[in-house]
Amino acid sequence: MENNIRGGNAPIACELEANKNYAWCTCGHSINQPFCNGNHKKEKASNPLIFSTEESKEAYLCTCKLTSNPPYCDGSHNK
Ligand code: FES
């Protein structure tokens, strides 16, 4: 989306709880990376991706927003 930016240049390790909904920032404007803080509204950028996991786990969540496997880092930040 036109108003989206990179939110960072490396993934952030996050402890995810099973069956809990998370809002992953897709626009890059959140100051609470990798999660949404509502900034997409004032920036007219893309909405967050709501996701959950079936098991509690640590995961590396993308901040650059270039991943092909959101919300997870796939190494695209190195491009
Ligand atoms: S931080 Fe976006 S692909 Fe790694």
Image (spheres, rainbow, N blue to C red):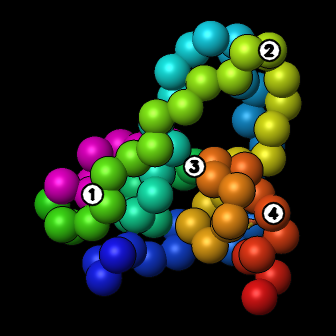
Badge 1 element: helix
Q: Position of residue 45 (x, y in %)?
A: 27, 66
Q: Tell me the residue at 18%/66% (across/down).
A: 44
Name the residue tied to disc 2.
Answer: 55
Q: Reply above or below: 75 against 18.
A: below
Q: Which mark is residue 61?
A: none
Asked whether 19 or 41 is in front, the reply is 19
Badge 2 element: loop
Which tag, 4 or 3, sits closer to the chain's start?
A: 3
Asked which quadrant contains residue 56, the reply is top right
Q: Position of residue 15 (x, y in %)?
A: 76, 26
Q: Which mark is residue 34?
A: 3
Asked which quadrant contains residue 39, the reply is bottom left
- Distance (Cα) linking label 1 and label 2: 29 Å
* Magenta span includes 36: yes
- Which amino acid type corresponds to the residue marked 2 in the rendered image? Glu
- Distance (Cα) linking label 1 and label 4: 23 Å
- Distance (Cα) linking label 4 and label 3: 14 Å
Badge 3 element: loop
Q: Which residues are magenta?
A: 35-41
Name the residue tied to disc 1.
Answer: 40
- Foreground mark, 1 or 4? 4
- Kindly tell me whether residue 32 is visible in this rendering: no
- Kindly tell me whether residue 6 is visible in this rendering: yes
Which tag, 2 or 3, sits closer to the chain's start?
A: 3
Q: Which mark is residue 74?
A: 4
Badge 4 element: loop
